Amino acid sequence: MIFGRKSKNQKFRLGESELKVVESYKYLGLVLDKNFTWKAHLVKVLDKARKRVQALSGLGLREGVSAKAMLRGWEVLVRPVLEYGAEIWGEKIWKEGERLQMEMGRKVLGVSKMTTTEVIQGELGWEKISSRRIVLRLRFWHKIVQMKKDRLVHKIYRQRRVEFIKGGKKDKKNWCYWTWKFLKELHLEHVWVSEKIELGSNFNKLVSNLMKNKEENEWRERMQRKSKLRLYRKLKDTLVVEDYVIELTMLRGGTNKLRIETGRWKKERENERVCKVCLCEQVEDEKHFLLACPMYVRERARMYARISEECELEHVESMDEEWQIQLLIGVGWREKNKRIRKIVLEYIRKAYNIRKKYVADM
């Protein structure tokens, strides 16, 4: 394989045999092409990772594997395939890889395609795989600069760094460009310049924390632009994995069959999306369904009674509505959180069963 431009009629021989010139070549698990586009490599790893996702999800359906086990399978069997060699090619925009991660998230949560990527990220505590590639790259860079000076990798890096700086830090084909750019975005350009970190600091941990903070800020900004996430924004503001179940995720994430959501699909104004179960002319949003609809008053009273009895938390029904929402489907209450979630889920299921008798879209 010839890297860069190929001259016409250029031939190579080994003894009397003419060597075949190829467009791509696999070396140490990486599929190289003459222009380093990495397209062939990304197609290969995506196909391999997709097969593993299908095997994992099939195992979950047949054998009843838990969501926790499926997540572990993703981390151990699938994600390493997507990230192989990412220290070298990781600056590429790779939408297909991100889509596969969201596809896996939907399978784990058991939610529909209409559930937003922000909700899936939030419930599973996932960063984008592009963010993980940046962290892998910067960790590799730190490893290189710590190497002995006689190591070949270190020598090549030094030469490319000199060329990058002499070129005014503009050559995007130089590996150093993206490393410098990512460090700069994390406000660590001074580390790039000095190649030193403060005594006692852990560079890998520092980079991971800064990247997570950056990711969380971008995730919150995206949520602000989506009206269907009005409730989710109040319940969730950090990327940490939740003790989730399907019904709760759909209610929290705005992907449910309440009129507030189905009316949006039909382009109805928000004040027109009234509850068809109680006919009280109130908008059927998550708060109405959980706290107010009179058609579920018996089930709701039982929910409050169980929370009082089993969790030793009294007068929940008298709390401010925002506090009730946080307690029931948000942050919960101390060590009683899991128990409260189970009680609330039982209420949700019973209320949905009642709703089915009056509304056809269930």
Image (cartoon, rainbow, N blue to C red):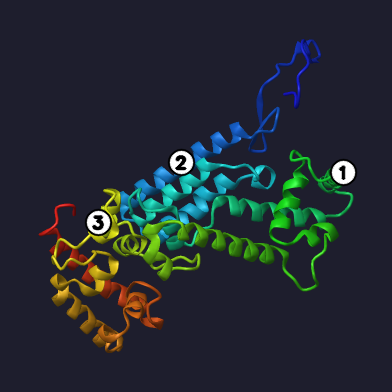
Does label 2 or label 3 sit earlier along the sequence? 2
Q: Position of residue 338 (x, y in %)?
A: 35, 75
Q: Nearer the viewer, mark 1 or mark 3?
A: 3
Q: Residue at x 44, y 68 (%)?
A: 236
Q: Secondary structure at mark 1?
A: helix
Q: Is residue 84 left or right of residue 191?
A: left
Does label 1 or label 2 sit earlier along the sequence? 2
Q: Which residue is mark 1?
A: 159
Q: Quadrant of the N terminus?
A: top right
Q: Which residue is mark 3?
A: 257
Q: Nearer the viewer, mark 2 or mark 3?
A: 3
Q: Position of residue 115 (x, y in %)?
A: 37, 53
Badges 1 and 2: C-beta atoms under 8 Å apart? no
Mark 1 residue type: Gln
Q: Is residue 123 visible?
A: yes
How much space separates mark 1 and mark 2, taking CA atoms? 38 Å
Q: Residues within 10 Å of mark 2 (few under 14, many from 20)?
A: some
Q: Is residue 260 left or right of residue 185?
A: left
Q: Which residue is mark 2?
A: 50
Q: Is residue 289 left or right of residue 231?
A: left
Q: Position of residue 328 (x, y in %)?
A: 32, 75
Q: Is residue 297 above or below residue 91?
A: below
